[in-house]
Image (tube, rainbow, N blue to C red):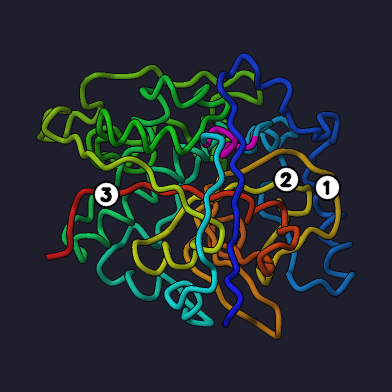
Amino acid sequence: AAVKVVAVCLFVALAEYSGVSAFIASHEKNIELSAEHLDKIAKDVNEAGASWTAGRNFPGGVSSDDLRSLVSEHDSLDDTPQKAQTCDCSSKKLQDDDKNYDAREKWKSKCPSIVQIQNQGNCQSSWAVTAAAVISDRQCIATDGKMKDQMSAQHLLSCCSNCGLGCNNGWPRKAFVFYHKHGVVTGGDYNSKQGCQPYEIAPTTDYKSALGGHGDIQTPQCSDTCTNNQFKKTMKEDLHFGKPPVEVCCCGAKDQIKEHGPIVATMVVYEDFLTYKSGIYRHIWGKKIGYQTVRLLGWGTENGEDYWIASNSWGTGWGDGGFFKIRRVPMGQPSECEIQNAYTAPAVKHKKH
């Protein structure tokens, strides 16, 4: 008889933000993240013959505080209730997957959100931006392209009081709970005039308009009305509701992506990740500076190396048009930048017609 392999994903909870100090990452707060420093790291990475190419992603005048404000001090998936998520990794459904799968290729003609990259600006809002993106993708996929609305990261960022500390990090799983219990409105990018509540924080490419450096950023206040005066619906009319969030077991990540759409992961950010341009990322050079919440859209293998396809929220000027590949490892091995440690996803109410 075949040996039944059971994978256990242990999710550790943080009950209250008051206790979060015990879990703060030991990242280096005194690192000088100047453009010149990153140029040196990029040079070292490229000379090392890594599986990825490095280069400059940010303008020369960017400050260390600007760059540091892009990442969080905390792991945004630490809020998941403490329990073991188990699944049978020997089951045919989980094992019989494609060697390569890219949700963008499958859905981009019907769901424009799946190829869209938002710019979070000088705000540690990757938790909200990524959560809104994944809700948008999954709603569109569930309706076979009929629901193309971009959901509002701004609404989650400013109005989900249980989600965390706004521009000082939050938890995407709690954003999905908010989506289930209270609903989320539509909202496009900064200055887009799209949806009920468009994003209010200037992109990182416009530092003169951004809301200061790290520690100076104020989370925009919650509004109980649509902030876009060109939008025709009321906020109540525009609310979209989901089901309780999905607890994604470790070996079920591929199945979730293929069947329902992108999922949310979190990863450790090292200095060299700021310089990523193309290829399959793995940490080569530099110290840990924090965490980032990202969207997983697929997987593949290139030159014998397995990878995940993911998107970031630092705009299209970063990385490969805002997307990146990162090394994927078999179950049971330490994952690259902890990206395979935990996942979460929203469950949508809409069905394919």
Q: CA distance from mark 2 to mark 3?
A: 42 Å
Which of the 4 image quarters holds residue 251?
Answer: bottom right
Residue 60: mark: 2
Q: Whole-percent x and y of residue 154?
A: 37, 32
Q: Quadrant of the C terminus?
A: bottom left
Residue 318 magenta-highlighted = no
- Name the residue nearer the viewer: 96 or 24: 96
Q: Amino acid at mark 3?
A: Val
Q: Is residue 105 above or below residue 148?
A: below
Query: Which residue carries the number 3 mark?
Result: 348
Q: Are marks 1 and 2 in contact (CB under 8 Å)?
A: yes
Q: Residue at x 51, y 77 (%)?
A: 95
The residue most toward the front is 1
Q: Residue 93, located in which quarter of the rendered image? A: bottom left
Q: Is residue 97 left or right of residue 269?
A: left
Sequence-wise, the earlier of marks 1 and 2 is 1
Task: State the extent of the magenta-drawn residues as a range.
Answer: 75-80
Task: Identify the residue under disc 1.
Answer: 36
The amino acid sitting under disc 1 is Glu
What main secondary structure does the magenta stretch of the protein show?
Answer: loop
